[in-house]
Image: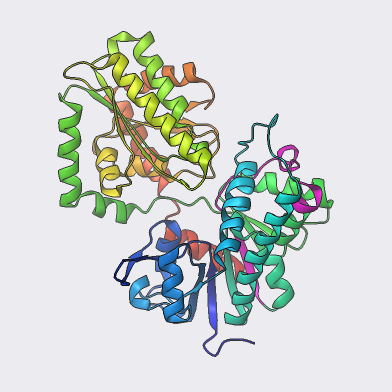
Amino acid sequence: MVAAHAARILVASNRGPVSYTLAENGSLTAKRGGGGLVSGLSAISGTEADTETLWVCAALGDGDREAVRRSGDRLDPDDSGGQRVRMLGIEPKVFSTAYNGIANSVLWFVHHMLYQTPLEPVFDADFRRQWAAYETYNAAFADALAQEAAEGAVVLVQDYHLALVPGLLRERRPDLRIGHFSHTPWAPPEYFRLLPDDIARQLLRGMLGADRAAFLTQRWADAFTACCRDLLGEEAAGATRIGVHGLGADQEFLHERSRRPDVEELMAALHEQIGGGHRKVVVRVDRTELSKNILRGLNAYRELLTERPEWQGQVVHIAFAYPSRQDLAVYRDYTAEVQRVAEAINADFGTADWQPVILHVRDDFARSLAAYRIADVALVNPIRDGMNLVAKEVPVVSDEGCALVLSREAGAHEELGADAITVNPYDVTGTADALHRALTMPVAERAERSQRLAAAATALPPQKWFLEQLAALR
């Protein structure tokens, strides 16, 4: 049954545009989300389409679930910046198993090629039980979207969490125009086939239920079509169009936000920590996500100081490593190892007036912007990354222009590689050499490269990125 106030445009994602915190006294505090999707959806604010748009997302924690219980899953638009939101109160164990057991511990690992294959993965009976929860979770989204969509509506489904939704929704509502967007890389066929054949085919067929499957780069799109050919045959993807939309940085927002007083204060605090205006600054900003390659980055910096001792006392590495997925043991261990290595570098090289590594693990966007502004070099060296917006944001925000050391395995390399210093993310010595090259780059060259990087980085800002996909489906 279609809802009384059916939506013409629907967005489906695991995380929505708002989250809730439940206090001990029972009060709920709403916090509006950030990121490209929230910015993208703001593109239709104030237009006729705005009143016909609905965001469908999952309740992620106790605060969200309490908000759903009190509101009947229709959130107060005042909490979400005026957007209409339906938040699904999926049973907590089903959600946790689907999200942590499958999405983050299997699909993420496959697409980022993170498995230590002598030991993992192991697809046993327990995996099959977890997979059943992932199917249930996807079905809940398909049911909600089928109920909420007007006749012929456009539905934009987001990411690996919801890979089965397009196919399930197509069965329920063949009249809809459905798009799926992958924000991660896509594994090549030989790695994707680590998955059991029936599961791999189910994932592909799920996404092929969309009218259009879109990716951040041509490389990831080509890998998807190669998997379809390999597992489903040449004709499999015929009815599904493939698109590429390289999400860019929001220049207007970044410029405005990075010039606010709180950022200026944090810049001053960082300058004080760095000590001495003569010192160069290498900046990285990441979640402590296994694919971000923070440990090899730190070891490359250590090698720079060891093999080129002239840099001792002359450079500071600001490393912001914000905790991610700390409910998974492997992520907790990784975060602890990042802290241990940073402390070891400081213990081995630090002096009374020089701290080689300034590490922060508490998420602070304003402080990240402050670091962007003072960076001489940005280090972005992921093992594998769908795009990496940090690589795009730093050149946009940097005050004096910034040299970019960029992994060839980041999706952003497709657009930024010509003006970045490219590294193999596994090559610590090569990365140390790249840092030296970046630190010694002439000021004029650095400024020119940074200007070109900023232009490429802002070619497809979030609003345009969203509207492009909408137009392609229509």
In the rendered image, the vertical position of residue 173 relative to residue 307, given as above or below: below
The span picked out in magenta is 176-200
Screen quadrant of the C terminus = bottom right
In the rendered image, the vertical position of residue 382 relative to residue 99, given as above or below: above
Q: Nearer the viewer, residue 330 or 180?
A: 330
Write down the quadrant of residue 180 in the picture. bottom right
Q: Position of residue 285 (x, y in %)?
A: 37, 39
Write down the quadrant of residue 78 in the picture. bottom left
Left/right of residue 368 with respect to residue 231 in the rendered view: left
Most extreme residue toward the bottom is 4
Which residue is at a point 47% across and 25% down the rendered structure image?
296
In the rendered image, the vertical position of residue 107 relative to residue 55, given as above or below: above
Q: Is residue 98 visible?
A: yes
Write down the quadrant of residue 349 in the picture. top left
Left/right of residue 262 with respect to residue 136 in the rendered view: left
Q: Position of residue 19 (x, y in %)?
A: 40, 65
Which residue is at a point 15% across and 38% down the rendered structure image?
268
Q: Nearer the viewer, residue 36 or 415?
A: 36
Q: Nearer the viewer, residue 420 or 330?
A: 330
Q: Position of residue 265 (x, y in %)?
A: 15, 44
Residue 228 part of the magenta segment: no
Q: Position of residue 424 (x, y in %)?
A: 53, 25
